[in-house]
């Protein structure tokens, strides 16, 4: 009898911070793959609010009581996404697509990753309608000025945001 190989996907991003839109993509990814690795990777064009260690802890806490918790792995990696995918034996990279405006950069990234490695496929999942308007930046902006971000990010994220933004209730 042969053991069926686990199908692992990587969901990479900055996650600064994780939002409910990301959670939606992770949960839907788990309907297709056995395991989803939520991987905090470095985007050189972004200046982060939370350190990688903070983001790791916040994301882990957000899934600590999730029903699929054992299939959600949270890690960070400093290097090329395709190299990380190889190390992890991942068959796919998951990316969420919110609107046409995401398409150009996502297309470029997917093609570059394909040029670098043919061993991993990029899969796009449409972001749920409820989360189309959300991004990490917009949540940070609202929180900075004390706006309510309930329902846009998991509770552990909201708690950590309060430490950075005293105006947030
Ligand atoms: N719901 C809500 N928001 C979403 C979302 C969803 N489903 N999907 C994406 N977003 C938002 C994110 O919150 C983020 O918002 P922000 O710009 O305000 O921070 C934005 O869309 C896109 O961010 P993210 O998905 O995190 O991608 P990124 O551009 O920050 O990360 C990396 C890109 C890290 C994956 C990429 O730079 C990478 O692979 N780096 C490693 C080095 C490498 O291999 N480079 C070559 C790649 S071609």
Image: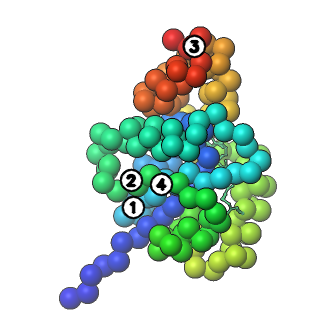
Crowd rating for badge 2 (residues with CA inside 10 Å; few <14, some 14–19, many 20+): many
Label 1 neighbour load within 10 Å: few <14, some 14-19, many 20+ = many
Q: In front: mark 3 or mark 2?
A: 3
Residue 101 position, x and y percent, is 77, 46
Residue closer to the observer: 128 or 142: 142
Q: Quadrant of residue 110?
A: bottom right
Which residue is depicted at the point 20% across and 88% down?
1
Q: Is mark 1 within 8 Å of ligand 1?
A: no
* Residue that lies at the very extreme toward the left in this rendered image: 1
Q: Residues within 10 Å of mark 4 (few under 14, many from 20)?
A: some
Of the pair 14 and 22, the residue shown nearer to us:
14
| On screen, residue 19 above or below 167 | below
* SS type, badge 2: strand
**What is the CA distance from the residue labelled 2 to the residue labelled 1?**
6 Å
Q: Which residue is mark 1?
A: 35
- 156 or 47: nearer the eye? 47
Residues at marks 4 and 1, CA–CA distance in whole angstroms: 13 Å
Give me the residue at 30% from left, 54% from top.
Answer: 70
Badge 4 or badge 1: first in the primary sequence:
1
Q: Secondary structure at mark 4?
A: strand
Task: Kindly check if marks 2 and 1 are in contact, taking CB atoms under 8 A apart as contact.
Answer: yes
Asked if disc 2 and disc 4 are in contact, CB closer than 8 Å, the reply is: no
Q: Can you identify the residue that label 2 sits on?
A: 72
| Mark sitting earlier along the chain (3/2) | 2
Give the mark, 3 or 4, whose residue is nearer the N terminus: 4
Q: Is residue 119 visible?
A: yes
Tag of residue 166: 3
């Amino acid at each position: 009898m042969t053991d069926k190989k686990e199908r692992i996907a990587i969901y990479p991003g900055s996650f600064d911070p994780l939002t409910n839109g990301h959670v939606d993509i992770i949960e839907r990814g788990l309907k297709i793959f056995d395991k989803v690795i939520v991987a905090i990777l470095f985007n050189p064009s972004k200046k982060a609010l939370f350190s990688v260690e903070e983001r790791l802890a916040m994301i882990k806490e957000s899934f600590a009581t999730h029903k699929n918790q054992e299939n959600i792995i949270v890690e960070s990696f400093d290097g090329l996404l395709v190299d990380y995918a190889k190390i992890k034996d991942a068959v796919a990279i998951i990316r969420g697509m919110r609107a046409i405006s995401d398409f150009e950069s996502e297309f470029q990234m997917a093609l570059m990753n394909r040029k670098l490695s043919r061993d991993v496929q990029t899969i796009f999942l449409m972001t749920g309608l409820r989360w189309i308007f959300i991004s990490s930046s917009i949540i940070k902006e609202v929180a900075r000025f004390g706006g309510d971000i309930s329902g846009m990010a998991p509770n552990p994220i909201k708690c950590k945001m309060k430490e950075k933004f005293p105006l947030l209730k």
